[in-house]
Amino acid sequence: MTEPFTVAACEPNGHAVHPPRPVCPHCGAIRWRRVPADGGVLEELTARRAIAEPRRLPEGEWIDQSEALLGRVRTDAGPVVICRVVRGPAPGGANLPPETAGAAPDAPPPVRVRLRTRALQCGSRVVEAVPEDGS
Amino acid sequence: MGDDAVIVGAFEARYERHPAPERTTEALIVEAVLGALADAGVDRSRVDGLGVASFSLAPDHAIDMAWRLGLRVRWLMEDTNGGASALNLLAHAVRAIEAGDAEAIVLAAGDRLGASEFHVLTDSYNRVTREQLAPLPLNGPNALFSFVTQRHARAHGLEHRDYGCVPLAQRAWAQRNPGAVYRDPLGWNEYLAAPAVAPPLGVYDCVPVVSGADAVVVTTRGAAGGGRSAGAAVRAIRSLHNPDDQEGDGTVSGFSEIVDELWSAARAHPEDVDAAYLYDDYPVMVAIQADECGLVVGGDLQRFLHKRLLEDRWPLNTSGGQLSAGQAGAAGGMHGLVEAVTQLRRSACAERQIEAELVLVTGYGMVLHTHGACHNAAVLERIR
């Protein structure tokens, strides 16, 4: 169900981008390959609040609207990815932010994370960040 | 060649959180267009140009609205750029008037957004959203602007309370705007205890989603004499879109690259404007725009927020802005323009009328992946 996260890099110069696009913004290349991007740093963290009713994605899949941690991760490969953050057991791992606005999230980024892609039944894929042990 | 362009009328179809079934997107846009023409004193038969921005008009387009409004036009445009659509339309309309392509153009933006329409909009905003963000699920851009706010706060040494000056100051203006959906006084206790939406963002850091529409009428200075009162001349408009390929972090925006040229073309300085209408989808974006557009005297953003905005009540977003009046989809891009024109024409209600002669209006939006990609700014001047 999961595999290590990868990003697109242009063939001639290896400029990594995410999300993928047809033309490299740095050199204009149009040929691409996938490169590993399964490590990175969680730079910001927030929580999307729970919504009571279930909801369908445009692709038709019902999604869980319970509270979710969302993060902005700078991959070691370069590009930024917006992803789910899986609550980790690590001391520096991502704990739920407090209930009221304003207070900074509990787990002070930056936190080292591993990144993986999870395939949903509808064919959509989501990127998950898992805080590294001991980080 | 034509004559100089001037905005001679503006109108906002009432914003509502829970509109009656008959207030469709089409009905809201019609209401705004007819209201703006009435405000301008321009007869519908004189209109020869129409520009429309809407997220929810599909499957109709601008030409359908021309037919539904009974307009025979020789200039027709549709703009899909959300928060930047109004000034984009205005820039084109001004050039069309000045080139003689049209003589009386109506620009309108509006959306009916119920809960289901809102989710369709936010889940399918663009292909990146549909494929990369909606499945998380993201449920709209709040989390993305939480990230921008956190980064901006670290870079500028600001706290949640500093950004709170924006919604608090704007709420004080909204109390004088019968059209705002949030009109109750907002104090620090309520703001700081507000339910979290995407920490550090709370309820009052996010716009209330509403249904509504806005419109303005642009015509030649010569023809404007038939109008009831003053108008707003466009001294300068500048735009920049996709300045950073989404590789920046959103805390430095495209405004930083266009403001020098804007002020130069407007033959003005930031300190010359009497009011500003900055696109306020989130407080952090007001802070970024105020800073980059040169409104923060001495560069002390924290002092600007607490002293200039909150304590001195300097006129920024005098309608209450989207944070208090509401965000009606694509109309959010025109809300500030309509308020600016209303103020310059001295047709605001007495409680919030200010004596502005020169104002700044901005548009911002279209999150491609992590932050907005579209930026435009205009300097408007009151003419009699």
Image (cartoon, rainbow, N blue to C red):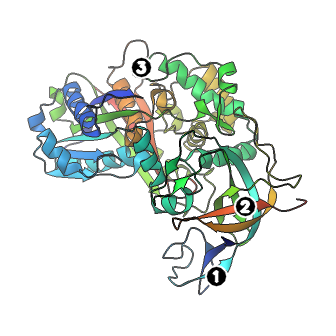
The residue nearer to you, when weighing B363 against A103, is A103
Q: Secondary structure at mark 1?
A: loop
Q: Which element type, helix, strand or loop, lies under badge 2?
A: strand
Q: Amino acid at mark 1?
A: Gly
Q: Chain of mark 2?
A: A
Three-letter code, disc 2? Ala
Q: Is residue B353 above or below residue B48?
A: above
Residue lying at 78% horizontally and 62% vertically, measured from the top left: A113
Nearer the camera: disc 1 or disc 3: 1
In the picture, the disc for residue A14 is 1
Give the labeled residue for mark 3: B355
Locate residue A40: give its quadrant.
bottom right
Up the image or down, B236 lies above or below B300; here it is below
**Furthest residue to the bottom?**
A12
Say if mark 1 contacts mark 3, CB within 8 Å. Answer: no
- Quick check: can you spot residue B10? yes
Whether marks 1 and 3 lie on the same chain: no
* Residue B180 found in image quarter: top left
Residue at numbered disc 2: A129
Location of residue B190 in the rendering, given as x and y in whole percent from the top left corner: 65, 21
Above or below B174: residue B108:
below
